[in-house]
Image (spheres, rainbow, N blue to C red):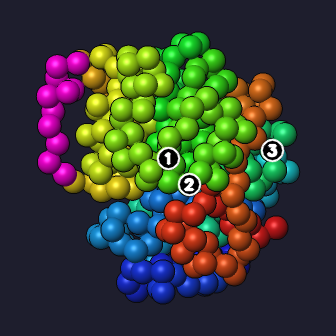
Amino acid sequence: MKNKVWEIQGNFGIQNLKEAERDESESLAPKEVLVRLTATSLNYRDYLMVIGTYNPRQKLPLVPCSDGAGVVEAVGSEVTLWKKGDRVLPIFAQKWLDGAPNMDNLRSTLGGPNDGCLAQYGKFSEEGLVATPSHLTDKEAATLGCAGLTAYNAVVNFGGIEPGSDVLCLGTGGVSLFALQFAKMMGARVIISSSSDEKLARAKTLGADETINYTTKSNWERDVRKHTKMAGADLIIEVGGAGTMQKSMMSVKPYGTIALIGVLAGGESSLSLYPILMQGVKVQGVIVGSRADFQKMNRAIEQNKMKPVVDKVFGWKEVPEALDYLQTGKHFGKVVVSWE
């Protein structure tokens, strides 16, 4: 079987991301499923993997991209969960089925260390897939596996929020907009920040209650306090990392939660831990989620007919351009690559 892929060859860097054709066996293990992939969405992790920052010791060549969507093409002799023609989504960590992960689960991730979804075909364990929400296109559904599930876990499983809770979402990338949508689904009030008034206006149309432009209001933690009657936010979707963490600690209420998801503004810094200690703040790292979490999220998405926010769709030949665009930070929501 000929399988067209994009792979990082020889060394890291977008310039070393090349199209290739692999000869692969058509035979399937008893519990294996062959999926004809149709779309992927780009995460910042994918960009860092391509340029060699995420894991400089990653073995090459590597097919990048953790997210995917497609259609079942064939199934192994003992597969009972899927049949040819089913629309499916691969899960990020192929061995993480339920509960808390272990290190073996976390080494089973797509797009590094294992080959990802920037390919025309992929082979997965039958339990390494979930059903695509029926009202979504593959382009839309390809955004769910990482950004969607990370936001879902941050808001629903770790956030401890209730109707009327205050949630602060930093930025208007994929995770933050998913968090906005899930928080509104749960009846929360949402404050969102951006450097762009245009993006903030678009966030309002998604249900954001308050907006903060962090370039014109550099002391944005004060605005968070004002918008929460000086109480602080119950939950903060922290995608900036060390560069914004100090302000987040000044924006959260006592016993509130900071869901640490990204490091867009830096991964290392000297931070005062006193606010965490003195106010009983919980800092919760969020690493996507399990297959069971993915299924629960998809049920909520279907029930509410929720639509992911897709900023721009690139074609198969435009993968380097798509990664360059992601890196600029100009996007509002998710950047998708689709080849069907």
Dot 1, crowdedness within 10 Å: few (<14), some or many (≥20)? some
Locate residue 261, reporting x and y percent: 41, 43
Q: Report if the CB atoms under discs 1 and 3 are less than 8 Å apart.
A: no
One can see residue 22 in this view:
no
Q: Position of residue 207 (x, y in %)?
A: 68, 32
* Contact (Cβ within 8 Å) of mark 2 with mark 1: yes
Residue appearing at x 71%, y 71% in the figure: 314
In reply to whether residue 46 is colored magenta, the answer given is: no
**What's the CA distance linking mark 1 and mark 3?**
32 Å
The secondary structure type at the circle numbered 3 is loop
**Label 1 vs 3, first from the N-terminus:** 3
Tell me where residue 274 sits by quadrant. top left
Residue 163 higher or lower than 148, as above or below: above
Q: Secondary structure at mark 1?
A: strand
Residue 325 percent across, percent down from the top left: 57, 71
Whether residue 40 sits left or right of residue 305 in the image: it is left
Residue indicated by mark 1: 213
Name the residue that disc number 3 marks. 136
